[in-house]
Amino acid sequence: MNDQASRTRPVAIAIRYLSMIAGCACLLLAAICFAVACQVFIQTGVFAQSYAMVGLISAVLGLLALTLARVWK
C-alpha cells in the first residue's frame, strides 16, 4: 500500500502545479484579450466581439484550472 501511495504523490503534485500554470496563463490571455477589445473600441468605436469572447472563454478556463489546483490532493 505504501509503495503505490509514494508513486502517485509526485503525479498529483505535477498535476497541481501544471494546472496552476495553465490557470495563470489563461487569465493572462484573458486580460490581454480584454485590453485589446477595449483598445479597439476606444479607437474605432466598434465592439471587438471576437476578442471579448476569447477573453471570456479564457477567463472561465483559467478559473476552472485554478479551482482544480486548489482542490486537487
Image: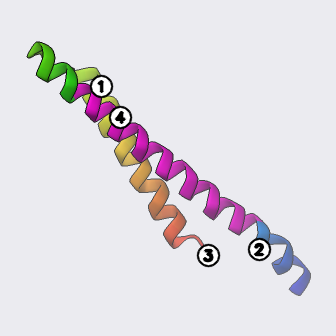
Residue 7 in the figure: left or right of residue 71: right
Report which residue position mark 4 lands on. 32
Disc on the earlier residue, 1 or 3: 1
Residue 40, quarter of the rendered image: top left
Can you say whether 73 is above or below 65 in the image?
A: below
The residue wearing badge 2 is 9
- At a point 49% along the width and 52% down the height, the residue shown is 23
The answer to whether any part of residue 24 appears in the image is: yes
Do the residues under discs 4 and 2 have CB atoms within 8 angstroms? no
What residue is disc 1 on?
Answer: 51
Name the residue located 45 percent from the left edge and 43 percent from the top edge. Answer: 26
Amino acid type assigned to the residue bearing label 3 in the image: Lys
Quarter in which the C terminus is drawn? bottom right
Q: Earlier in the sequence, mark 2 or mark 3?
A: 2
- Label 4, label 2: how far apart the Cα atoms are: 35 Å
What percent of the width, then of the height, locates residue 66? Answer: 47, 60
Q: Under tag 3, what secondary structure?
A: loop
Give the Cα separation between the discs numbered 2 and 3. 9 Å
Judged by depth in the image, the label closer to the viewer, 4 or 2, is: 4
Residue 37 percent across, percent down from the top left: 23, 26
The CA distance from mark 2 to mark 1 is 39 Å
Mark 3, residue position: 73
Kind of residue at badge 1: Tyr
Whether label 4 touches label 3, CB < 8 Å? no
